[in-house]
Structures are given as C-alpha cells and as structure tokens.
Amino acid sequence: MSRFYSAQEASERLGVSRNTLYSYVSRGLIRSEPTGPSAKTSRYHALDIDRMATRSRIYKSPVKALQNSTDWGAPILESAITLIGDETFYYRGNCVPTMAAGQTFEKAIAILWEISEYESVSVNPVLRKKVEKLFENRPGFDLMDLFQSVLALLNHEDVTAYHFTREAAMSAGRMMLESFVRVLTGTWSTGRIAEHLTVAWKVDPLFVPILDGALILVADHELNISSFTARCVASAGCSPYASVAAATHAFLGRRHGGNTERIRGLLDEARGQGSLYRVIESRVKRGDPVPGFGHKLYEADPRARFLLPRLPDLNGYISQAQEAAEKLLGFSYPTVDFALVVMEKELALPEKSGSCLFCLGRLAGLVAHVMEQYAQNRPIRPRAQYVGKMPG
C-alpha cells in the first residue's frame, strides 16, 4: 500500500477531475502536503483517497460494492479501539509501536479496556480453584485444546459473566488471561505476564521488554477475523468466555493465526537446507507460496519492523528474509507472524510458543471488542444476496 498518491493517481483512483480533487482537499475531506520544502506540487494521503473511493463505489453500485465489503473492504462496524493508519496503527489514539517500546503488556491492556490499571481488575478465587482442578484431570493435552476446555468450564461456572457489564467482562478477561498463562507455563502468574513467561521458559531477563512488546503489538488489529467473530457471538448475547472461545477457533485457522504453522515449516525447511534465502528462491521458481511475507494493509508490517531488529539473528533468518523480500518477493516484507516464529526459534522458546504468544496478546483485544459490542447492544445480522435457484 502506497503512503501517498500523486495528484494524477489520486484523481484516477477517485474517478474525478483535478479541480474536484482540490475541492475535496479544501473541504478537509482529503489530507495533502507539499512534495518538498519548496515544491509547488502536493501529494495526497492514500488512506483518505482509498476510503473515499470505497464510499464512492458503495454509493454508485451498492450491491456490487457491498459484496466485497467484508473482504479487506469498507469498515462495517463502528469501533473506538484500533485505528490502522498508512504504515502504523493506534490503540485509542496511542501509537502502538511507541507503546511497545516503553510500556508493559498490562499497561496496554489498561488502555484497551479504558481503566487506570489492569491490576485493579479482580479475579474470583473460587473460579481459579475450579480451573486448577481441571488441569489436574487433563494431563498431556494440546495447549490450545486445554485452553478451550478452560473456556468451556468458565462459561458454565461464572454466572456473573452473564451480567454483560464492563466490570463482569473485564473480570472474565483477566480470568482468561491468567488461565492461559497457567496453560502455557504450568504455574499461575503472581506479577507481570512477560516476566513470568521468561522465568517459566528460562529466557534471559534481558528479553522481557521484547515479550512485552510482542504481546502489545498483537493485542488488537481492528476487525480481523477473530475479533469480528467475537463481536458476532457477543452480539447474540453470549458470555465473554463463549465469545472468546469462538474467536480462538477462528484465530487458529490457517488464514489467521494458524499461518504460523506454515511459517514454522518454512524455517524448518531452511534449517535443513542451511539457507532461508535458497528455500524462498526455490519456492518462487516453482510458483509455490512463501508464507509470512506481505501484508494487505501495509507496505511493511509495523509489528514485524519493530520486533525483528530487536531479536538476535543467530540462524540468519532475519537478514535472509530481508534480502529475499527485496530481491525475490518484490519488496513483500515479513509479517508479524514471521517475526513471532523467528522469536520462537532465536530465543529457544517452547515449540509453538509463537502462535501461543499471538493468541495470549490477542485475548486483551478480544475482551475490548466484546465490551464494546455489549455497549452497542444490537445484533450483528448482515443480509445475503441470494444467487441460488429461484422458486417456481
């Protein structure tokens, strides 16, 4: 995605004359800025142009436009949680990479949930004991399957979650976060989540800020598949646990968080052949997909741009990925999924911990979406355009 359009590109994208484009700028509908300190020409923000072009298509041909509106298209729900900009994104007006550089995951949760501090949210000790009892009866379970069992138990046991208040949703949210940390580490956290993970996984404490940053960066990303799923289920009048359970299943799909499995396979193949660059080159020649590169919303994923330079590159994955992006993939840069799997490899984290960190961080955003949907208090019920056999 280009950050700016020239006047000609903007006019063509909108299907309007230059004079009409200039009138949009004067009315504050489109942002522009000079192309240089003394330049007489201007460039136009791509985000503004693309949004106006989408609205124009909906106005001129609503049926055709709305057919594509749920596939990387026009926003379909109002939300005050996350804004995706040209090449970065924001939680409630706060630049997320900036947050990741100097804040804790708990502080980011507080911002997403609009509270003073995450630690102020209470957890029911009776529920925690029931969850611990469940762990005793589920030895050897897959981590994500075990977490789904926890969500089912909490959905049944926590009657207060059905009050559908902000307080009840936040309490359920903290219960889910702490339970998932227990699933990942085998012990309950008594302090900051990132610190607890480094101790349990025997990671150098120097990498605590990196884990904090990773969890912050993946906490939310607007109306992605899992967040939209959580909102749909919440709009039906389901508990936060049921909403997050449905969202977690969606998250694990191969086109969402489950993509980390394919990236892990790519890196395993690279380890076998001794070069990630050669593996990518071979795939490009064969016409095979290269998972973990290219994001539809960014020219370069800001989450990966933050994480990769802060990680060691003992296996050469980071430098070779950058070289492959520029020489083989048409400047299709690594995504956050790739960065999380590289983190798993470079820090010698437990197997599949990259995708688990993604899911752990995303829990904070899912709870924020559930709370926002409860506040809107209306069902999500899109209509379908029937294209099947007509009756009679």
Image: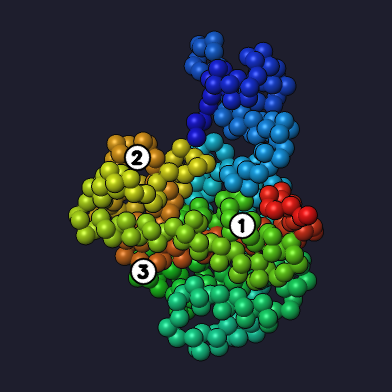
Q: Residues within 10 Å of mark 2 (few under 14, many from 20)?
A: some
290 over 174 or under it: above or below: above
Provide the secondary structure element on which disc 2 rests.
Answer: loop
Looking at marks 3 and 2 on the same chain, the residue that comes earlier in the sequence is marked by 2
117 over 300 or under it: above or below: below
Labelled disc at residue 351: 3
Q: Which residue is mark 1?
A: 227
x%, y% of residue 378? 79, 57
**Which residue is nearer to you in this view: 211 or 380?**
380
Q: Residues within 10 Å of mark 1 (few under 14, many from 20)?
A: many
Q: Residue at x 66, y 30 (%)?
A: 52
C-beta proximity under 8 Å, tags 3 and 1: no
Q: Which residue in the rendered view is the most extreme toward the front?
A: 392
x%, y% of residue 316? 25, 50
Q: Is residue 226 visible?
A: yes
**Which residue is nearer to you in this view: 51 or 137?**
51
Q: Residue at x 67, y 68 (%)?
A: 240
Provide the secondary structure element on which disc 1 rests.
Answer: helix
Q: Residue at x 60, y 75 (%)?
A: 151
Looking at marks 3 and 1 on the same chain, the residue that comes earlier in the sequence is marked by 1
Which amino acid lies under the numbered mark 1 shown in the image of this protein?
Answer: Ser
Labelled disc at residue 329: 2
Indicate the quadrant containing the C terminus: top left, top right, bottom left or bottom right: bottom right
Q: Quadrant of residue 14?
A: top right
Which amino acid lies under the numbered mark 3 shown in the image of this protein?
Answer: Glu
Q: In front of the other: label 1 or label 2?
A: 2
**Which residue is nearer to you in this view: 346 or 334?**
334
Which amino acid lies under the numbered mark 2 shown in the image of this protein?
Answer: Leu
Provide the secondary structure element on which disc 3 rests.
Answer: loop
